Image (cartoon, grey):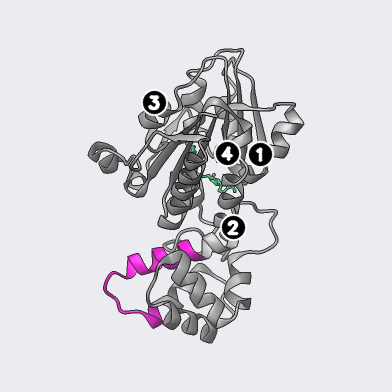
Amino acid sequence: MIQERQSGTQVHVPVLPTEVIFYLNISTDGIYLDGTVGLGGHAALILDHLSPKGHFIGTDRDNEALLLCNKRLSGYPTPVSLFHNSYHNFNAILDELGINQVNGLLLDLGVSSLQMDSHVRGFSYSTDSDLDMRFDSSQEIKASGILNHLSENDLANVIFQYGEERRSRAIAKSIVKMRPLTTVFDLVESIRRSTPPNHRDRTLARVFQAIRIKVNGELEKLENFLSTFRDRLVIGGRVAIISFHSLEDRLVKHSFKDLAKEGVLSILTKKPVIATNEEMAENRRSRSAKLRVAERIS
Ligand SMILES: C[S@@+](CC[C@H](N)C(=O)[O-])C[C@H]1O[C@@H](n2cnc3c(N)ncnc32)[C@H](O)[C@@H]1O
């Protein structure tokens, strides 16, 4: 993912920017909630289309990102409310704000450039640091907790299901043998000892992704959101979700399909929208992005 620096401020380049704005079909006086507001890349684009009568709400589990986001969004005339919370708690957040329904919901799942490039948070296999991987640093369980305490069998299942890594059993065995793991490079070494050198980077990426998903309970939170968002969207309002993992995309696809069968949603993206070749060339992260959008119709 590309990062820019503007007046000393870190800026996250959002994926599928034109497509997100096109599909959200923003009402200028509307209320929009970005559940994974991150560094405010998509948020700024949404705010460009909102009047002072509108309202922008953002949530993120990462306090560090929220501080930067707050700074970035402070100049807009539209009211902005940011919450350090998981997007799956958005019902409670809307209740707190006294808002019944919103005109648009956006989720851009996964990791931000801020997190990936951090030298201390353990998201990247190429930088040695504490085995952390928490989106929310107030959460108790870290990657080291998962890696050092899960049974070998459970660990293999996590690596297989969330990482889609077929050498999961050998990797889990190697991790258990090397316990206790304390650093990113300990995990890299346990993977190195149990897998062949060809395509090692891909293996590392898959295992790190799997552990991150487990640490942060990412699929459970998405499932929870998908089962509760419908009543909070106005009729004519839209929900847009960008995923980077086949399991996430499957959850979104099936949830939208079920709600379409019930006559609640109309699916606007029969196939997921993917980035153009130009965007993929400029922004690596966009290569695996899939956007699905639906409109509430009843
Ligand atoms: C890909 S980034 C979003 C970037 C943002 N769209 C932008 O343009 O700046 C994903 C963000 O989702 C956040 N996140 C992940 N799971 C979350 C959750 N359950 N609730 C809220 N935020 C979450 C991460 O902390 C990260 O900041």
Looking at mark 4, is its residue's CB closer than 8 Å to ligand 1?
Answer: yes
Foreground residue among 4 and 143: 143
Looking at mark 2, is its residue's CB closer than 8 Å to ligand 1?
Answer: yes
The answer to whether the residues at label 4 and label 2 have Cβ atoms under 8 Å apart is no
The image position of residue 5, as x and y in percent, is 43, 34
Q: CA distance from mark 3 to mark 4?
A: 18 Å
Q: CA distance from mark 1 to mark 4?
A: 8 Å
Q: Earlier in the sequence, mark 3 or mark 2?
A: 3
Q: Which residue is mark 3?
A: 22
Start-end of magenta stretch: 192-210
Residue 107 in the image: above or below residue 189: above
Q: Ligand 1 lies in which image quarter? A: top right
Rendered image quadrant of residue 169: bottom left
Which quadrant would the N terminus be assigned to in this image?
top left
For discs 3 and 2, the disc positioned in front in the rendered view: 3
For discs 3 and 4, the disc positioned in front in the rendered view: 3
Q: Earlier in the sequence, mark 1 or mark 2?
A: 1
The answer to whether the residues at label 3 and label 2 have Cβ atoms under 8 Å apart is no
Q: Which residue is mark 4?
A: 35
User: Dot 1 lies on which element?
Assistant: helix
Determine the residue located farthest toward the front in the rendered image.
262
